[in-house]
Amino acid sequence: MARWFAIAVSVLLMGVFAVGAGLVYAFYTWGRGLPDHNQLATYEPAMATRLYGGDGRLVQEYAVESRIFVPIDAIPKRVIDAFLSAEDKTFYEHNGIDFAGLLRAILITNVERKLEGRRSVGASTITQQVAKNFLLSDEYSFTRKFREAIVAVRMEQTFTKDHILELYLNENYLGAGYGVAAAARNAFNKTLDELTVAEAAFIAGATQAPGRIMRDLAYGRERRDYVLDRMYEDGHISRAEAEAAKKEPLTFNRPSDNEAAVGAEFFAEEVRRDLQKTYGSDVLYKGGLVVRTSLNADYQAAAQKFLQQGLTIFDVRHGYRGVLAKLKPGEGLMEGLKAFKAPGGIPKEWSLAVVEKSAPDKASIILPDGTTGSIPLANLLWARQVKVNKENGDRSLGEVIKSAAQVLQPGDIIMVTHLDDAPAEVYNLRQFPDADGAVVAMDPHTGRVLAMTGGFAYARSQFNRATQALRQPGSAFKPFVYLAAMESDYTPSTLVLDAPFVADQGPGLPKWKPKNYTNEYLGLTTLRRGLEKSQNLMTVRLAQAVGMEKVADTSVRMGVYDQLPPFLSAALGSEVTTVIRLTTGYAMLVNGGKKITPSLIDRIQDRHGKTIFRRDQRVCPACRAETAAPASDVKPELADERAQVADPGAVYEVVHMMEGVVERGTGRTVAEVGKPLAGKTGTSNDSFDTWFVGFSPDLVVGVFVGHDEPRSLGPKETGGSVAAPIFREFMKVALKDKPSTPFRIPEGVTFVRVNLDTGKPAEPGDNKVILEAFKAGTSPFSQLTIMGQSDEDDALGPMNRQLPDQPAAGSIY
């Protein structure tokens, strides 16, 4: 008996020795070449770069993995408890391997799973999961599990439990994002400390099947309730709390338009390109930058809305180009509508629809949600068929619409919109505009871009017409010709001949014969009236008198061009520029001739909160919190470091004349805003490009509309009819709650009552009298003698001096 006992003990000892030797061999063999776990001491996970507007609203996020890193001491206890109960309740007790849990998995859980035909589970601790996710592969094998265990033990010997848990809670994909903070925001639009117990349990339950939990609500509730039961069993919540949490409806609440800037895709893409160029793709998509932009979310939404609205109104004047698709005969209407792939870029106020019936007085439609409605004949009268001449590309409209059936037939898939003032069942037909455009809004004192939209819809075309489209500004360039003249001591009262003009272009070239848009001539007219009415021939004569070299220099100083060829045609805006550059030039008009550079980024912080870029580099010791004066004291003043690039008095003369463009000239439609405004229309040859650029004392806005492949917008389409209404509607919103601030007057400017038509000092009985602005050293009295209209040719001051090879400045022929 003793002999058999000795044999049994020997066998047992040999078995233990063999197992021990096997373990030693395994640790020696598989422990070699393992990744260095020490790198996790300073591990920085890939984090999203987030763009914020000036009011703190999210603009855009760029990431390989949508993640918001949160340190462990900032993660609420209920969230930690939920994950420990779901994944590793003895996390703070084991040394990296939960042997009891491992045996339970091997002997009970995996046997049940094998019988059910499912894959075995490994009972990995949180530490083991961190080892696998950060340092090892996702391969399911005994070798990988053993290597995982070795790394887990080493990690436990090196790091604190809190550090390991911090890595775990910030790394894993949890269905709605990477890490607990991103999941909370994307699933419930909440911060971690705002989560309920039920919501924390749901997020913790996402670890098992993150790809399924957001799209399968039944599975999501099952996982949430499982975690709640475990939290109760582990003593983290009471039974009553668990049952109450289970009764909460599982409702996702993703971030809405109120929390994010609407229609800011073009703006965000411009910032993204800048960040990528400066910092590279890795930092952009993984570096966790926090970018504070200049975007005003309300202005941006208005810019997008009114550009779309203006383009649509313009498009309606030029006919209907056809339906999106036609369903096959016999194809179910609802089935066909649901199967149709909607084109990108449909405004949120529009909807797809399918025509059910078409009668003379209306077309009956069905929307994707089953709602029915109709488009009455009155709303289809604009939809005349567009006909294109194949030889020259000219467009014309087809026959007048007398029946809805002329436009729409059953089975047609179309786009519609409901107007606010119309009955609920009445809709309007819509189509994507054939033309496109851009809007830029800017702070004229700093160059901060407050809004930018580069087209009707970013989803339709990513080409940014605000920054990338090179277009002719037409008459919108004229203020810079006038500025060159004002700096040469001409005045708004200077008389210029508005009459036919012919210039020799050189041997073999035809004569250049510019015309006024209206083909009407005003004769001797003041510069003010010439700018208000946008008379081309006056501008050409003025540019010839001042000298195109001065005009070119002015345009470069004002940022419109890098260089401008000294051709007279350039005075009429024949050279291309961008919306943002022209708007910047106008900004320097209203700010008194101070140099600014357009900017979209105010500040950039790295993942640790350190500022690595700041737009405004001025130092203000008195602004610091520890030295700031009480609120009742005088606010600290910052030095104005902007360069003076134009004479403030001359600039104001131009601004004052541009107020007249709005009050009496080609921009009269803008006067509806009811606030002090100035601006200029622009229309290039044959109406290829239409503009309105204008400003209040503290906001400058540029609007452009044209075809991407330049062609005429129509024989009667101008900056005043196409672009100015967009500017007007935007300004109504932007200035709604702003005071009526007058334009700031620089020192040295005097005002004289003059006759609007003649520019001479007003006399008793004059009907049209205005207050005209004159910079220091000039006045309307120097216009008493006009060269060419008098036998006297003696000079009367600076307004009548003779320039080399130029006519006298008092009047120009």
Image (tube, rainbow, N blue to C red):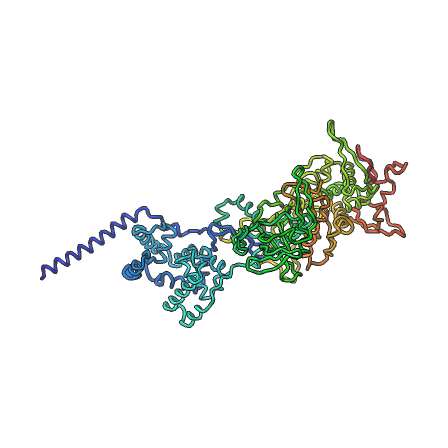
Above-or-below relation of 265 to 8: above
Quick one: 88 or 572, which is closer to the camera? 572
Say if residue 567 shows up in the picture.
yes
Q: In this view, does 13 lie to the left or right of 52?
A: left
Q: Can you say which quadrant of the picture contains the C terminus?
A: top right
Quick one: 15 or 422, which is closer to the camera? 422
Residue 595 place in picture, x, y as percent: 67, 45
**How many marks on residues?**
0
Residue 485 place in picture, x, y as percent: 76, 41
Residue 169 place in picture, x, y as percent: 42, 58
Above-or-below relation of 511 to 471: above
Point 34% across, 58% down: residue:
125
Quick one: 787 or 663, which is closer to the camera? 663
Q: In this view, does 767 lie to the left or right of 612?
A: right
Residue 559 place in picture, x, y as percent: 66, 42
Q: Residue 682, located in which quarter of the rendered image? A: top right
Quick one: 602 or 109, which is closer to the camera? 109
Say if residue 445 shows up in the picture.
no
Above-or-below relation of 545 to 464: above
Farthest bottom residue?
A: 240
Q: Is residue 232 left or right of residue 318?
A: left
Farthest front residue?
A: 330
Q: Can you say which quadrant of the picture contains the N terminus?
A: bottom left
